[in-house]
Image: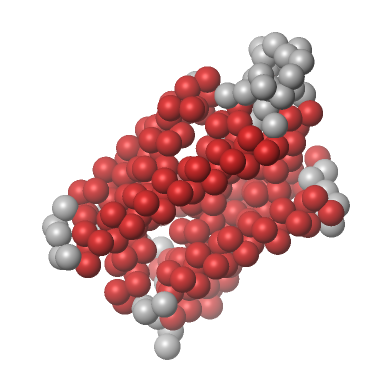
Amino acid sequence: MRTGNPALNAKTFEGFDLTAPSASTTMTLSGTATKTGMLLVIVVAAAAFTWNLFLQGNPIVMPLMIGGGIGGFIVALVTTFKPQWAAITSPIYAVMQGLLLGGISAVTEAKFNGIVVQAVFLTFGTLFALLFAYQSGLIKPTENFKLGIVAATGGIFFVYLATMIAGFFGISVPFIHGNGWMGIGFSLFVVVIAALNLVLDFDFIEEGVNRGAPKYMEWYGAFGLLVTLVWLYIEILRLLTKINSRD
């Protein structure tokens, strides 16, 4: 089983004692869904905090955003290598990402009124639409499907990494980051790939439930799903920003 989300990887199941007999000690879909909801509430609360600070003109917003971004990345790495700690690290990750998203959203909303509401509705609309498509069998995560999404996700990562490194040397890549049709097309492609990663996340979570993964994997599955949702929201917000900046 493959997933483009580095947090949700088939190797995570290796070495588990998958013989626990009851729902109280094994991973369940309802438990994972509940914990995902809890993490989303934490993200929203932290984002609202940063948003309000921005509205007040508090200069601490930028340090909170940077700290949230860097801290979230570090915590995500720790959680990926230590899934057993997910019950503790995933809420911390949610706080960090909330601080980051709150600042990004507030700054973007100040430039384009109403854009954040659009991004939020599109993100959750995509989540529920793909969940329905997955559960109904309209989208089946075959091995070729998984391989294609993983390859595309890896390609996007290396493109972003290359442009970031180029930026350190004062070299910009205007075509994919600009608001021209090429830049909009690139963002649309990234949004589609980020969205399809949700299907792979659903498949990973279902696989964990079917294999009787330990209870703490509910937190880990929720964490992995949150990673994809945060990425999807940021990419949708970036796409809408490019579109609105053309007006």
Residue appearing at x 50%, y 72% in the figure: 118
> Left of 37 or right of it: where is 207?
right
**Is 77 or 131 nearer to us in this picture?**
131
Q: Is residue 47 visible?
A: yes
Where is residue 227? Give x, y as percent: 51, 44
Q: Is residue 21 above or below residue 100?
A: above
Residue appearing at x 43%, y 27% in the figure: 88
**Is 193 or 131 nearer to us in this picture?**
131
Find the residue positioned furthest to the right: 137
**Is 161 or 200 nearer to us in this picture?**
200
Where is residue 211? Give x, y as percent: 77, 24
**Is 129 or 231 nearer to us in this picture?**
129
> Left of 235 or right of it: where is 148?
right
Quadrant position of the C terminus in the picture:
bottom left
Q: Is residue 10 visible?
A: no
Q: Is residue 158 above or below residue 245?
A: above
Where is residue 42? Give x, y as percent: 42, 46
Residue appearing at x 34%, y 50% in the figure: 46
The number of numbered discs placed on residues in the rendered structure image is 0
Residue appearing at x 35%, y 72% in the figure: 109
